[in-house]
Amino acid sequence: MVDLTALGDAILRGERAALARAITLAESRRADHREQAQTLLSRLLPHTGKAIRVGITGVPGVGKSTTIDALGSYLTGQGHKVAVLAVDPSSTRSGGSILGDKTRMARLAIDPHAYIRPSPSSGTLGGVAAKTRETMLLCEAAGFDVILVETVGVGQSETAVADLTDFFLVLMLPNAGDELQGIKKGIIELADMLAVNKADGEGATAARAAAAQYKAALHILAPASTLWSTPVVTISGLTGAGLDALWAKIEEHRNRFEAKGLIAEKRRRQDVKWMWAMVQDRLQAKLRHDPALKARAPKLEAAVAAGEMAPTAAADEIAKALGL
């Protein structure tokens, strides 16, 4: 049995081993672990909420890990404590995960003021781990004042990460053919800032040209808020160029929105979404583990696959078994 009082005290003292143990507890699928994690979170909740939460996305190859390594190192150099929650794609066959972020973020991995937590997505919507929010709160309770949440950049993960964070940063590539073709309107509407990466060496000119095109494209979209127009910056995750200006924009956004009480308002809306996400998680858990349903499901699947039963009829039977 875990001593939750001692574990909570250790987290508040910033002990990394205690933080890692608590996150493992929160990520567990065991019912008793989940109950203990919720008890621990309830106790730590008054010590959370003070961090700047930044979501970072971009297509594979855009340099997310390199940029986060450089940005995190810049921030720890400025006196911040940085936690990186890097959501890895899990195998849909084995459930395994690469968990290679610590090797891709070499500087942060050995920085005493940084904490990297690779977390398998386990097939959850868009690749965002179901327990990422709990992990974020635990890191805040441990004293981390900047939380960087990296998404795998596939499917609907961008929306899920935007619902976890205060500021949503989208990394873009120069020299990606028709730059504007790669912009999904939905992502741009979520973005609080676009950063064209790899603006170094021979890529600097291409990055500036791409940034100009993105700025022109943004003019035709109505801003999400009258307080903020989405800026476009050029950066180099490799050399660190432009990261100071990027962070200054993030701080400017926070100051503007916090002064109007909009950060707190946004987080309250996110909490409601979190509540419903947890309800869905409970339903899915029951779907996976209900003994009667586990026995019946293979027969229903076989009947549907053989064309002997309509999918709607099978779905109705499953719903009835769950008491829905």
Image: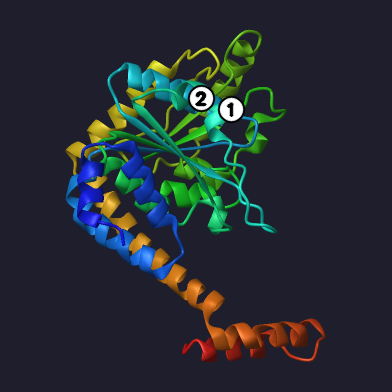
Badge count? 2
Q: Secondary structure at mark 1?
A: loop
> Splitting the image into 4 quarters, where does residue 299 fall?
bottom right
> Which residue is drawn at the image coordinates 40% and 40% (left, top)?
223
Q: Nearer the viewer, residue 69 or 174?
A: 69
Name the secondary structure under disc 2. Answer: helix
Of 190 and 213, nearer the camera is: 190
- Label 1 Cα neighbours within 10 Å, binned few <14 / some 14-19 / many ≥20: many
Judged from this view, the residue extending furthest toward the top is 201
- Residue 10 visible in rendering: yes
Q: Is residue 170 left or right of residue 244?
A: right
Residue that protrudes farthest toward the front in the picture: 1
Label 1: which residue? 63
Q: Residue furthest right?
A: 306
In the rendered image, residue 118, in percent from the top left (x then y), is placed at 50, 41
The x, y position of residue 77, in whole percent, is: 34, 16
Q: Is residue 76 above or below residue 280?
A: above
Q: Residue at x 43, y 42 (%)?
A: 222
90 or 163: nearer the eye?
Answer: 90
Q: Label 1 to label 2, Cα distance in Å?
A: 6 Å
- Residue at image position (62%, 42%) is 98
- Rendered location of residue 52, percent (x, y): 30, 36
Q: Quadrant of the N terminus?
A: bottom left
**Residue 324 pos. (x, y %):** 47, 87
Q: Amino acid at mark 1?
A: Gly
Residue 165 visible at all? no
Q: Give the numbered dot on residue 44.
A: none
Kindly identify which residue carries mark 2.
67
User: Crowdedness of circle 2 by 10 Å Cα count: few (<14), some, many (20+)?
Assistant: many
* Amino acid residing under circle 2: Thr
Locate residue 136: give its quadrant. Answer: top left
